[in-house]
Amino acid sequence: MTRIITPFTAQSTAAEVLAGVDLTGRRMLITGGGSGLGRAAADALREAGAEVIAPARRELDLSDLDSVRAYAEAWTGPVDAIIANAGIMAVPERRTADNGWELQLATNFLGHFALIKGLENHLTEGARIVLVSSGAQLRAGVDFDDPHFETRPYDPWVAYGQSKTAVVLLAVAVGRHLDGVTANAMAPGRIHTNLQRHIDEATMRALGAMDDDGNLLHPEGYKTPEQGAAAEVMLAASPLLAGVTGRYFDEDNQEAQVVPGGPEPMVGVADWSVDPAAADRLWELAEQALKQPRGAR
């Protein structure tokens, strides 16, 4: 496949991406749309004319499959785009959802999978799915032998990386399993949002993102929420990406090059994140999870 190059840069904002785009009559659902990146994306989409639904967590808890099912069953009308923006990061200690899935994998991946499947019959022809991943997908593939850290030591960053790899694999799988729908994943880059709530101050200082007094810093390379949301709205609504599916776009709003996953690469998308066989295997695993009764695995 020819690598896609867009006219946008890391500094482009969501509003700039949608300049001149008329989304009147388009209906879009975004998770985590109440703050940070999600709010910036929702605001830009509404400004362009779209109807945007951004449910609060009390309405849609992605870590709870019963909550996702109830939300999907109550949905009425069409949906032209689903932006899977909500997520959690680096949960300090191993925690599981009610179905036994490791919490980051359950929330970032499985909850969104369940939402997409639950709304499948409402997706319009050509509907777009946007999956918010992270450069962390370079660090950990999906461990199909022990995805929930039942035997291997729990590491919050490995678990986060695995969940974000799963998100990219979902983008690959959608085009293989759902007709008439496109899906792509993206990395927003480094941004101060509520996503960092589990990161301790020592780590934040080591990243150069906090001073000794606890004040947030914006070192070179950090983005505003409006810049981080640029790829979200680009994949959800830009005519430039019509018909494109199964791709991963990096912090520069360009399709990333495929590289070997591991501790060394700092840019690109890991080969394990776009492996069709792994995408199909993960899809099957997720489908089985949806069939299991509450509390069972």
Image (cartoon, helix red, strand yellow):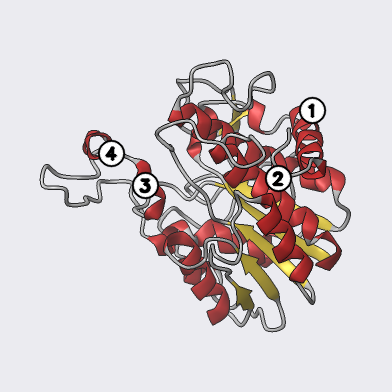
Q: Badge 4 local density, few (<14 within 10 Å), some, or many (20+)?
A: few
Identified by mark 4, the residue type is Asp
Q: Helix or strand or loop: what does disc 3 sit on?
A: helix
Identified by mark 3, the residue type is Gln
> In this figure, which residue is indicated by the disc labeled 3?
196
Q: Badge 1 local density, few (<14 within 10 Å), some, or many (20+)?
A: few
Which is closer to the viewer, label 4 or label 2? Answer: 4
The label shown at residue 277 is: 1
**Is the N terminus in the top left, top right, bottom left or bottom right quadrant?**
top right
Of the numbered discs 2 and 1, the one sitting upstream in the chain is 2
Front residue (pair 53, 49): 53
State how far apart marks 4 and 2 are (Cα): 31 Å
x, y percentage for residue 256? 58, 39
Give the vertical position of 112 relative to 266 (above or below): below
x, y percentage for residue 41? 51, 67
Q: CB atoms at circles 4 and 2 under 8 Å apart?
A: no
> In this figure, which residue is indicated by the disc labeled 2?
171
State how far apart marks 4 and 1 are (Cα): 37 Å
Of the numbered discs 4 and 1, the one sitting upstream in the chain is 4
Which is closer to the viewer, label 4 or label 1? Answer: 4
Of the numbered discs 2 and 3, the one sitting upstream in the chain is 2
Q: Is residue 244 visible?
A: no
The label shown at residue 200 is: 4
State how far apart marks 2 and 3 are (Cα): 24 Å
Front residue (pair 57, 108): 57
Q: Quadrant of residue 27?
A: bottom right
Q: Is residue 215 visible?
A: yes
The label shown at residue 212 is: none
